[in-house]
Image (cartoon, grey):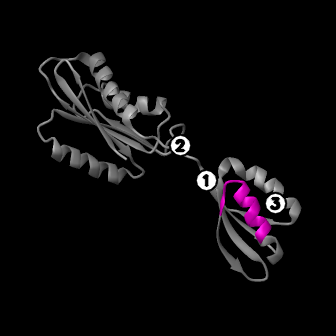
Amino acid sequence: MPVVAETEEKKSRFICWLGPVTDKAAFLCQLEMVRARYPDASHHCTALVIGNPGNPEVMQFDDDGEPGGSAGRPMMELLLKQGVGNVGAIVTRYFGGTKLGVGGLMRAYRGAVGVALQSAELETHVPVMTVQISCDFAGESRLRFLVSQSGGTCGEAHYSDEVLVAVTLPEDQWSQLREKLLPEGFSVHEKN
């Protein structure tokens, strides 16, 4: 759930919108809503990290007219340092009359995102994978039991001369489950 936090630095107001984002287009729509809400603000700087923060699918920032690297980059670097992915940050600045300098801007923008992060309810992302597993009819209940023990779920079963089940489970549980399944005669069809 998005949070909004406000900080002040030498009479400049910094309002940070921080929320879950998995789609760049949706983030750009959110940016337009923030711009419409604060039309008289000096700047609307952004940072976006989509995917695993250790290896993001999308990672970008925008200084929106602030000196290069003084706003969006420190915002994004804080998100990455804190290990937060699938998140967007928009910091709106109302200029207070005192120039902060590049170092002061970096601290202020990073600080606004930091305050918002303290208020946010973060969820741990667990990477999952889906595999197809086939077995004979007698093995279906055993398969469902082993998948459940591994923290996975079984999708719909397709019946022909055997049972084919789509299994979704945490990636880190796959090798252990596979080691249990193969000796018992289950066939594994990994998706790439």
The residue segment tinted magenta is 141-153
How far across and down, in percent of the image, does residue 143 sit? Answer: 77, 65
Numbered disc 1: secondary structure:
strand
Residue beneath label 2, please?
A: 124
Q: Which of the pair 177/188 is nearer the observer? A: 177
Q: Is residue 108 above or below residue 27?
A: above
Q: Is residue 156 above or below residue 87?
A: below
Amino acid type of the residue that numbered disc 2 sits on in the rendered structure: Thr
How far across and down, in percent of the image, does residue 19 sit? Answer: 36, 44
* Type of secondary structure dominating the magenta stretch: helix
Mark 2 and mark 3: span between their CA atoms?
28 Å
Residue beneath label 1, please?
A: 128
Amino acid type of the residue that numbered disc 1 sits on in the rendered structure: Val
Numbered disc 2: secondary structure:
loop
The nearer-to-camera label among 2 and 3 is 2
User: Residue at the spot x=32%, y=20% of the render?
Assistant: 107
Q: Is residue 122 above or below residue 159?
A: above
Q: Badge 3, how many Cα within 10 Å: few under 14, some, many 20+?
A: some
Mark 1 and mark 3: span between their CA atoms?
18 Å
Q: Is 62 left or right of 58, judged from the image as shown?
A: left
